Structures are given as structure tokens and as C-alpha cells.
Image (cartoon, helix red, strand yellow):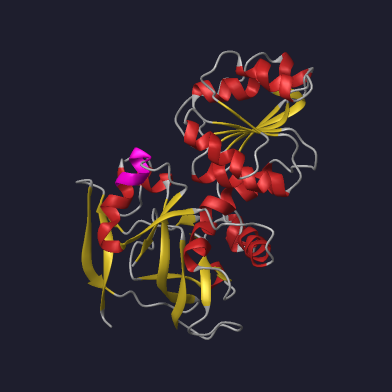
Amino acid sequence: MTTMRAARFDTATGELSVQDVPVPRPAPGEALVKVAACGICHSDLSLLHGAAPSRLSVITPGHEASGTIAELGSPAPGWSEGDRVVVAAGRACGQCGACVSGAAWDDCRDLRVMAFDYDGAWAEYVVVPVAALTRVPEGIPMEQAAVVADAVSTPYAAAVETARLRPASAVGIWGLGGVGAHLVQIVRLLGAAPVIALDPLPEARRRALDLGADHALDPMAEDVPRRIRELTGGNGLDTAFDVVARRTTMRQARLSLAHRGHLVLVGVTTDTVDLGPEADYTIGRHTVSGHLGYRKRHLEELVRLIAHGRLDLSRSVSAVLPLEEIAEGVRRLESKEGNPIRVVIRP
């Protein structure tokens, strides 16, 4: 097979179209993966709307991918054609200080991101580094495996690495889309109590309760920080995750923190962080951290949790569409039609 179908985005014209393009060939250390499924993420919307830059003038989007190895560019111990895999969406630059020193590829200081810096997986095939592959057991559906590579791994990394969440921590989550809905499941799995979910959409709040939240609040209601303190015995939140990261949500989350509370900003926007009174950070011992992405080991840990029944992603895929309907999938996510967790493309 010499050609394939791929969704191509022209950054100059803003046009997204499905085209016939050459099947890429893997170089040594790379694998050609036949894509089984690829999610549509809000980061993809940022690319399509020009809010997130690309290093290429025309690029194939899509960075939440699963599939099977179709070809190896060179022998790779432990890997064979036909292996089921989920793909980490990054490759090392090979030139920064971390890369030159021999650090792990996901310690790269100028990490290239799939679908932004090199072609992604809204296509029949994608070329990725062998180092980015994680094996997927037979019992995990490929559509679920695909969304692990961001919609699940990003909130998981935010909880276990950036927040270093401890059992019995009081947790609040602002924004209950794909990342926020999975974050509800993850913090409950890690023992957070109580889990307070916040979203203006009633459907999103109901879903959060079904996924394990103890309380679901409308952030547009009056005096939300006071209500959060009532629900936490007067203490406030040990950890507040802001997946929206707008000026209003950042302020509300900050005002809801307990003594030594930690605000973790997971959403990416251009809004300015409102730090508030300096005394909150000295006397109140508050901290604020930004979070982006995940490490390869997070994918491996999540696959193990799913395979052993600790994490249930059966409700994570809201719709599966063919590649030719990529524009419809983008529209559904953008309009929040049906309040999707993830719309997935099957090439």
C-alpha cells in the first residue's frame, strides 16, 4: 500500500480536508502504526483555530492514538509487527542538554508533540518512535486505549505527579469535559475524599456524580467557595484542579483552598493568573502549579489499571466516526453536542 487517507490541516488557510497522501516510511528506531482509533481533543481545536502553533504549514492532526505495528524501521527487541499499542504523543528533539546527556526521551526540554510538530494520527497510518509505544492487552478495546494517550494520562499525571495526591485529600475539579471527567475517576481511585466536581452544564454534573464525585456544584452559583468549605467541614480544598483555567475559575479555585492548599492548573489559556494576597502563600502556605501532558510510564501504569479492572473507561467514548467524518466529530466536540467525553475517529 503506497497511499493512505489522512486529514490534512492547512495552517495558512485554516482548511481541514481528508486527502490521499503517501504512506510514511519508518526510519531506524521508528515504527509505522496502522491506526485503529484516534481521539478528538480540545488541543486539536486549539490547533484548528490558530491558538496553538504548528511547526509545519500543512499537518495531520490527532495525538490520541492506538493501533497495531505495521512495520519496524529497524529491529526492536520486544516488538513485532501486529502488536497492539497505544502511542505516547511526543518525540525527543535529540539536541537539548537532557537529550545529549542521555536522559529519557520524555525528559527532553524541547519535546516535539505529535500533531503539532510532526504528523499525527487522523490518518490510516502514523510513524512514531518505538520508544513511544506501550503494549495494549487484548481485553482492552482500541477506542478506549486511544483516549488513554491524553484524556486519561494527562489528568492521571496531574494527580499523581504534579499534585502528589494523598488519600483522604479534599479535591475540587473545575471543568468536567474529557479531562475533568477522567480526573473525577482518577482522584477517587487514589482515595480523595470528598471529591467536588464543578461545571455549569447540568448534564456534566450528573455524569460526574455517576463517575464517583461526592458533590457536583454549579460554578456560576452564589458564593461557591463558602459552599465548598461547608462540604469540607470548614477546611476548604487540599487540592483544586482547574481544567478550564479561565480568570474566573482560577480565582474561585484559589479562594476555595485550605491551609497548605495546592492549586493545579491543567487547562491552557492566555488568561492571567490571579495570585491574590501574598499572605495566602506565606501564612496560608498556598501553592500554584501548572501541569501539561504525561510521561511514558503513566501510560504503562494506566494500561495496567485498566487491564486489572481498577479503572473503567467503558463510558469514555461518546461516539465513533469514520475518518471521512472528521469535520463532524470536530463540530460535535466544539458545540458540546451530547456532552461528549471523547469523540473517536476510526480510520
Q: Quadrant of residue 76?
A: bottom right
Quadrant location, the C terminus: bottom left
The mark tally for this picture is: 0
Q: Residue at x 32, y 59 (%)?
A: 60
Q: Residue at x 35, y 50 (%)?
A: 54
**Image height of 18 relative to 32, above or below:** above
For residue 97, above or below residue 332:
below
Q: Position of residue 2 (x, y in %)?
A: 26, 81
Where is residue 178 shown, x and y percent of the image?
50, 46
The residue stretch that appears in magenta: 331-336
Q: Can residue 101 be seen in the rendering of this structure? A: no
Please provide percent x and percent y for residue 17: 21, 57
For image coordinates 33% across by 39% down, the residue present is: 335
Residue under the image location 64 percent in, 47 percent down = 185
Out of 156 and 76, give the one closest to the viewer: 156
- Left/right placement of residue 13 relative to residue 23 reads left
**Residue 290: where, in percent of width, then height?**
60, 37
Q: Is residue 331 visible?
A: yes
Left or right for 173, reference 176: right
Task: Residue 332: say if magenta.
Answer: yes
> Does residue 83 show up magenta in the picture?
no
**Quarter of the figure with the N terminus:** bottom left
Q: Is residue 330 above or below residue 28?
A: above
Relative to 340, 144 lies left or right: right
Which of these two is toward me, 28 or 98?
28
Give the dominant element type of the magenta stretch: helix, strand or loop: helix
Decide which of 156, 26 is in the foreground and name it: 156
- 234 up-or-down from 65: above or below: above
| Foreground of the two, 34 or 119 | 34
Name the side, left or right, on which 169 lies relative to 66: right
